[in-house]
Image (cartoon, grey):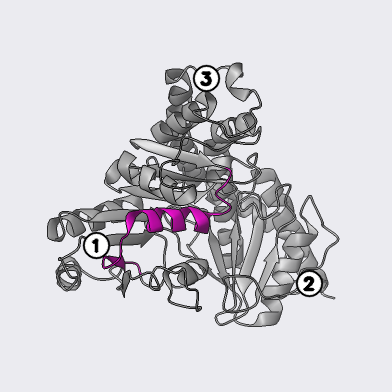
Amino acid sequence: MKKLFDATELIAEAEKSLACARAEMDEIAFVNQKRVLEAFHKHRLCEEYFVEKTGYGINDKAREVIDEIFADVFQAEACAVRMQLVSGTHALACALFGNLKQGQSLVSVTGAPYDTLQEVIGITGESTGSLKALGVNYVEIDLIAQDEKARRSELEKIAKSASPVFYIQKSRGYSFDRQSLSNQQISELIKLMRAIHPGCKVLVDNCYGEFVEECEPTALGADLVAGSLIKNPGGGLAISGGYIAGKKACVEAALDRLTAPGIGGHLGLLYNQNRLLLQGLFVAPGIVSQAVQGAQLIAYVFEKLGMEVSPGPFDKRSDIIQAIRFGKAEPLINFCRAIQRFSPVNSHVLPEPSSMPGYQHQVIMAGGTFVSGSTIELSADGPIRPPYAAYLQGGLSLMHVKCTLAGALEASNSGQFPFF
């Protein structure tokens, strides 16, 4: 087969062109790394906090210190870091169930939420345990593309009788056309919502956004943020778990849902993961920076080859996700197979589209990762539905992203996994 392009030359051109953008990400990583290091020093982290505990974990000092360190890193009053939180969706669900009562309204102001949260709310599925089934009202609006006048009009329609909880999804989810929100955009939304609904609470789905910018939404007025430890904040070392950070009362209410009223955050083992959680947090700012730089590199190369990408290579980033539109199922599937082929784990495995809990369409997933399902490690996935886009994220090192990009391009060039 005739060679379509030279992958090495394309990557070299991309790296040269992206030099300033990469330097900017390094500066952001430095700010975040400094904040993490200061939190470790403030709470006098020492080896005794790595010791294994068993049983109930009653008032475990190490767990308390880990919570305090994460709270400072997330610029919040409190934080709960728990291995019992099985995913980002679970962390968000606990935050929602803990802070909403029957008759209150949950208002998603960023349109339809990510697929897996829709059954939690009760938009899809028939669960008797969803928020809607338990008497919580749900309102969905999309304020992202509107001007302030239109936003104000939409927010004034929301009932004020019971203080609403506003939900903001920072990342794009499986939506090609929707951009992720910057913390500045989130801050503007929060100010407007509080001006119209002074008693409201604001929950931000922070998945994929941690450490991409110089601060977190909790520094800009969010009452709660939640996410997964096998995404950005675990630095590739956390083997599972999630976090909920924000106002102390809101975090405690979420913990009552995770465990039980009266138990809250006073019990719960970290299953001898203390060192890995802290070490992962310590390296996370640098690893997130590498992941973003890898996404910029991929965006440049694919755009150069005529593909539609979002965000563009020089666009400001507020999460680690890089979307690439393929337009058809076959090239999307082949692209994910090429990514899997150059993974460090299970490189011999051929991904197939399949049904996944919480998703309405079959999903193709490539993720030859050391931690199963880790999306701070290089992975790619996408639902088998128009516009047949791949959502690529992660990369523990820029070198691995470069190796994978070069290998995937050659695999397409040779006809092994054609996706152009």
Q: Earlier in the sequence, mark 3 or mark 2?
A: 3
Provide the residue designation for mark 1. 164
Amino acid at pointer 1: Pro
Provide the residue designation for mark 3. 45
> Disc 3 on helix, strand or loop?
loop
> Disc 2 on helix, strand or loop?
loop
- In the image, residue 70 sits, relative to residue 317, either above or below, namely above
**10 Å neighbourhood of mark 1: few (<14), some, or many (≥20)?**
many
On screen, residue 227 versus residue 47, left or right, reads left
Please identify, in this view, whether the residue under mark 3 or under mark 2 is nearer the observer. 3
- What is the quadrant of residue 135 in the picture? bottom left
Provide the residue designation for mark 2. 417
Amino acid at pointer 3: Leu
Mark pair 1, 3: CA separation: 39 Å
Q: Residue at x 35, y 60 (%)?
A: 168
Q: Where is residue 313 in the image (x, y as percent from the top left)?
A: 50, 58
> Disc 1 on helix, strand or loop?
loop
Q: Position of residue 100 (x, y in %)?
A: 32, 59
| Cβ atoms at labels 1 and 2 below 8 Å apart | no
- What is the quadrant of residue 389 in the picture? bottom right
Q: What stretch is highlighted in magenta?
A: 83-110
Please identify, in this view, whether the residue under mark 1 or under mark 2 is nearer the observer. 1
Amino acid at pointer 2: Phe
Q: Earlier in the sequence, mark 1 or mark 2?
A: 1
Q: Residue at x 70, y 67 (%)?
A: 336
Q: Quadrant of the C terminus?
A: bottom right
Q: Position of residue 261 (x, y in %)?
A: 41, 46
* Residue 75 in view, yes or no: no
| Cβ atoms at labels 3 and 2 below 8 Å apart | no
The verdict on residue 103 being magenta is yes
On screen, residue 80 versus residue 249, left or right, reads right
On screen, residue 349 versus residue 215, left or right, reads right
